[in-house]
């Protein structure tokens, strides 16, 4: 770790130059249709376009501009009808009842941009972009399901999170947030029949075609309660014998309305909810959320906080990868490794518990800092673990990665290349397994990651084996980062001296009545975050994770969009599995590394 750790806070606008270069290139593009550049988004260029100009400008950005934006990173929407502050000053954004938000990523530029489309309530429709990015399929279905915005030309626009019989669109502002806001549930015989009818499996509705009038394929449900699908996840299989003709994923069984909950929880009290999104990632889920809030509030966290956060995030990266490593081996036929790896995970949780007071879901990061300073004796516990784990990882390499059976089950299975990964929005180890060395911690450093010395493991084939190998190598790099945190931990405070830091420093509460009132209000109602919008991505355990937060100058989010890495990756299952055997699909699912709470939110 470099000696300049005290200066690890990045400048306020670290990507301003890349953003300005993009705007300059866009202005030189003769084919780009009319757009309006939002003036208050200097680091995340935001273009407003009418629905009729959406397809031309997306095609220009993906295919014609230098260093194109080849990845559709996210697609979401905002119900603007109750919003009072649209930007830092009034009238900075065009009038709209709803807004479609497209996030694009250029890996060559290391730059994210936003395309926003204003929609009137009387005409909630936009053209589908599935012809430009196949990954838009699920994103558009999600927007239709939760907001009621239609997409002309979508191949199969139907609900994806809610049951087909659901009434209304849950992320609209006029949709209830609690069951107590509705009449008591009653299931009469007629409604029961309708619900049963909606559950009938009709292959044509899933995009499947029957074989002929005299013969048929076999249709098989894998899940949603099968140990190999890692949660409540269903794959409808169309089979010719044991060979897969088609595999259609079905999600939404774990949907809990995490984005809706953010609209009724205070900024501070929502932090524990983030822990449960990728429930194997722990505080890694807290990080993009608090970073986005700190950006909106103008909070600069102390250097010690930065390093503590990095250390805890890498500990949870190890924890998550140990779960993946063990269950991957188990899914392809090995029983012993998962027991050894879970034992190591328990040892790691002992360190996490000593530092945070909890194990899987510590909810330990705070707006402006962390919950408390490191306890006495933390160095010894961390150092012992750093000395212990490398030998175990070496043993696991012999048990799993060098095992001939594992290699036969996973080599050249579930293959995709770099271009296909980018086309489908794949990030993290799944992208690096194709040979592309692109890691957000290196390319767009946050929380002081640019001060650490570590390598980016990459695969060669982009198959199931390489996806496991990359994660196994990442564990060695996480140990390197943690050791640098241990050896170079700076002193100083662990919370920012800022009025919106939560909770405020306790000693100040005894100074005068004003600080006591501030402490009480921040702890109960939560801080009032200035009106604005921020989206901060991080390299989480399974890929890039981000929170797009909108504040209307209140104590809770006006809109909180959670972009998770598992959502687009599961959408790629049909491409990875067609023509293979059912047993190969199990290896493919095991290699993706997902949790359904991360997918469904």
Image: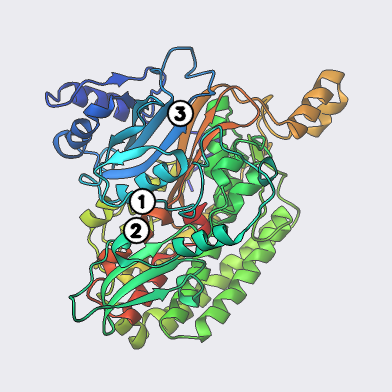
Q: Is residue 350 visible?
A: yes
The Cα atoms of the two marked residues, 3 and 2, are separated by: 37 Å
Q: Which residue is mark 2?
A: 571
Does residue 468 appear left or right of residue 396 in this picture? left
Reply above or below: 198 against 309: below
164 or 15, which lies in front? 164
Q: Residue at x 83, y 31 (%)?
A: 507
User: Which mark sits nearer the N-terminus, 2 or 1?
Assistant: 1
Q: Quadrant of residue 513?
A: top right
Categorize mark 2 by other alpha carbons within 10 Å: few (<14), some (14-19), many (20+): many
Name the spot of residue 26 as percent of width and height, x first: 20, 25
Categorize mark 1 by other alpha carbons within 10 Å: few (<14), some (14-19), many (20+): many
Circle on res. 11: 3
Question: Given this view, does label 2 or label 1 mark the residue nearer the observer?
Answer: 1
Local SS, label 3 = loop
Local SS, label 1 = helix
Q: Which residue is mark 1?
A: 138
Reply above or below: 537 against 232: above
The Cα atoms of the two marked residues, 2 and 1, are separated by: 7 Å
Name the spot of residue 317 as percent of width and height, x first: 51, 59
Question: Given this view, does label 1 or label 3 mark the residue nearer the observer?
Answer: 1
Categorize mark 3 by other alpha carbons within 10 Å: few (<14), some (14-19), many (20+): few
Name the spot of residue 561 as percent of width and height, x first: 49, 40
């Amino acid at each position: 770790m470099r000696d300049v750790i005290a200066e690890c806070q990045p400048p306020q606008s670290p990507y301003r130059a890349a953003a300005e270069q993009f705007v300059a290139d866009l202005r030189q593009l003769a084919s780009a249709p009319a757009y309006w550049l939002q003036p208050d988004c200097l680091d995340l260029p935001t273009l407003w376009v009418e629905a009729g100009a959406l397809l031309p400008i997306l095609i220009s950005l993906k295919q014609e501009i230098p260093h194109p934006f080849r990845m559709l990173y996210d697609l979401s929407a905002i119900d603007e009808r109750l919003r009072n502050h649209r930007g830092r000053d009034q009238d900075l954004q065009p009038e709209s009842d709803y807004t479609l938000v497209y996030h694009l990523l250029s890996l060559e530029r290391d730059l994210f941009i936003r395309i926003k489309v204003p929609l009137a309530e009387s005409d909630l429709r936009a053209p589908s972009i599935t012809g430009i990015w196949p990954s838009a399929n699920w994103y558009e279905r999600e927007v239709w399901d939760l907001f009621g915005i239609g997409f002309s030309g979508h191949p199969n626009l139907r609900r994806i999170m809610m049951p087909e019989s659901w009434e209304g669109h849950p992320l609209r502002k006029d949709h209830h947030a609690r069951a107590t806001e509705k009449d008591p549930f009653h299931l009469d015989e007629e409604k029961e029949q309708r619900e049963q009818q909606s559950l009938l499996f009709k292959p044509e509705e899933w995009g499947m075609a029957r074989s002929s009038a005299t013969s048929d394929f076999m249709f098989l449900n894998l899940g949603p309660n099968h140990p190999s699908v890692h949660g409540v996840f269903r794959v409808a299989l169309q089979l010719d014998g044991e060979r897969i003709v088609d595999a259609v994923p079905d999600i939404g069984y774990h949907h809990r309305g995490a984005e809706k909950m953010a609209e009724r929880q205070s900024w501070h009290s929502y932090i524990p909810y983030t822990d449960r999104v990728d429930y194997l990632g722990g505080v890694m889920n807290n990080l993009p959320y608090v970073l986005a809030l700190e950006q909106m509030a103008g909070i600069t966290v102390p250097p010690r906080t930065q390093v503590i956060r990095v250390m805890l995030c890498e500990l949870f990266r190890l924890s998550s990868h140990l779960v993946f490593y063990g269950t991957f081996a188990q899914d392809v036929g090995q029983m012993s490794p998962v027991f050894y790896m879970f034992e190591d995970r328990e040892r790691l949780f002992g360190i996490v518990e000593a530092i945070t007071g909890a194990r899987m879901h510590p909810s330990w990061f705070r707006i402006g800092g962390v919950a408390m300073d490191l306890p006495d004796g933390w160095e010894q516990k961390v150092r012992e673990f750093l000395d212990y784990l490398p030998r175990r990882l070496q043993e696991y390499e012999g048990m799993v990665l060098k095992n001939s059976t594992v290699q036969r089950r996973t080599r050249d299975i579930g293959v995709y290349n770099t271009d296909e990964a980018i086309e489908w929005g794949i990030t993290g180890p799944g992208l690096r397994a194709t040979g592309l060395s692109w890691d957000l911690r290196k390319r767009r450093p946050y929380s002081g990651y640019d001060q650490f010395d570590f390598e980016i493991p990459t695969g060669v084939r982009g198959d199931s084996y390489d996806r496991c190998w990359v994660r196994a190598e990442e564990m060695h790099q996480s140990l390197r980062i943690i050791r640098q945190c241990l050896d170079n931990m700076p002193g100083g405070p662990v919370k920012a001296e800022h009025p919106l830091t939560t909770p405020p420093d306790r000693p100040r509460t005894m100074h005068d009545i004003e600080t006591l009132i501030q402490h009480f209000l921040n702890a109960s109602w939560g801080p009032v975050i200035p009106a604005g919008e921020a989206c901060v991505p991080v390299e989480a355990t399974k890929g890039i994770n981000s929170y797009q937060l909108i504040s209307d100058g209140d104590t809770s989010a006006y809109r909180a969009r959670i972009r998770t890495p598992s959502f687009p990756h599961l959408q790629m299952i049909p491409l990875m599995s067609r023509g293979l055997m059912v047993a190969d699909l199990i290896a493919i699912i095991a290699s993706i590394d997902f949790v359904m709470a991360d997918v469904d939110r």
